[in-house]
Image (tube, rainbow, N blue to C red):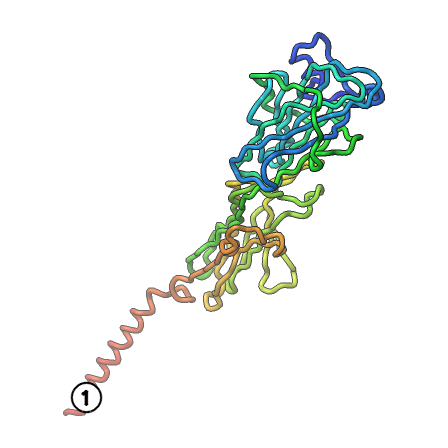
Amino acid sequence: MNRRVRLGGVGAAAAAVMVLGAQAPVAYGAGQGNADRLTLDRLGRDGPETLDVGSAFEVRAGFTHHGKRPLRRIVISLDASEGLSFTREYRNCVYGTEARNISARAEYRALCLIRTRVEPGESIDLTPLSLKVGKGALEEHVGVSYAIAMQAPYSQWRNIHRGRGEELTAAPRTGVVPPDERRYTDLLSAQRDVSVDNAWDMEVKGAALKGRKGETLTARLALEHHGASVRAQLDAENSIPFARVEVRFPKGVKVVSVPEGCGRGDVRSRPPYYLCEYGLYTTGFDLPVLRDGFHMDFPFKVRIDDPSELGAGTVRVDAPAERLRDDADPGNSTAPITVEAIGASDGLGPLVPAAVAGAMALAGLLAFALVRRRAR
């Protein structure tokens, strides 16, 4: 059974064919595998093993035709993860961005219709694909596949447009494929990892509060992420966040309101502490990410109950040490929470100095009267 790949309500391969000028839409499916078996056997890139932000590189991809009849056109799928971008778009390709929600890591995708004759047993290589490393890149990938492999339905693409300029072409292979670019001959698709030399930093914001005994104050704590993007959740069930925020208030303070996303830690702990999550979730196989500029507030409401016990509290990034070893500035992963009581603990602060002064004045008058009485 053939399955269509969806692209905004139109089969993706069909959309590519129609947009690029064919007379009739074509669906590519598993049923064509024996006759039109074009498999990916080359995928490599130039440049060093680890790339710098802003650097450009090229990806080389090639296929071998293991089918029984000549091919006259092929549809190739390209994809690049969010930290990369295509720097050259071809007029025989349709481009778009795929992401199911704003938290998910985006994929830049393209479907390209290439008109070329490929004989059984022949190997072809695509025009080198040009890409660039973005400022949020860290662990990225580039993928290439033959459209026959695209059997799972896409969710909606955004920013759909046709490329301009020259055509993406394929030519008969010349020479030998370098060992590091070879792929198994039965693959319809493959990805090439792209590691980037980039830094990230998770920062927490503490609070400095002042108030009287019994007064309720708001501690506006916060988490921020800077630099390269990192995975926000480490599993598909969204149950293992990359990090949490741990909040510990000083003694003498009672928490009267807990913000959304926060809850008690170990209930046996005294005084209690709280763990907060940033609430970035996705469904299916999407990867939620923490991007540069992410900011989330955690406004706790607290009451000063005992000024005599006030000390120092903390807010910190809570995650295993090995997960945070690449944090560019571990010093800002912890911040203080301070609470200062204003006036005396009984709330009569302004009256105390006057009462003391009055008592001293009265004592002076009594002493003066006693001296005069003895002098008589």
Work out whether 58 lies above or below 312.
above
Say whether residue 126 is left or right of residue 371.
right
Q: Amino acid at mark 1?
A: Val
**Quadrant housing the C terminus:** bottom left
Picture quadrant of residue 69: top right
Give the residue at mark 1: 371
Question: Along the line of sight, which residue is nearer the eye, 50 or 213?
Answer: 50
Question: Where's residue 3, x and y in %?
Answer: 79, 22
Say whether residue 299 is left or right of residue 340.
right
Work out whether 82 lies above or below 243.
above
SS label for mark 1: helix
Question: Along the line of sight, which residue is nearer the eye, 186 or 259?
Answer: 186
Work out whether 191 lies above or below 335.
above
Question: Where's residue 190, x and y in %?
Answer: 72, 32
Q: Residue furthest left?
A: 376
Picture quadrant of residue 291: top right
Question: Where's residue 276, x and y in %?
Answer: 59, 50
The crowd level at tag 1 (other Cα within 10 Å; few <14, some 14-19, many 20+) is few
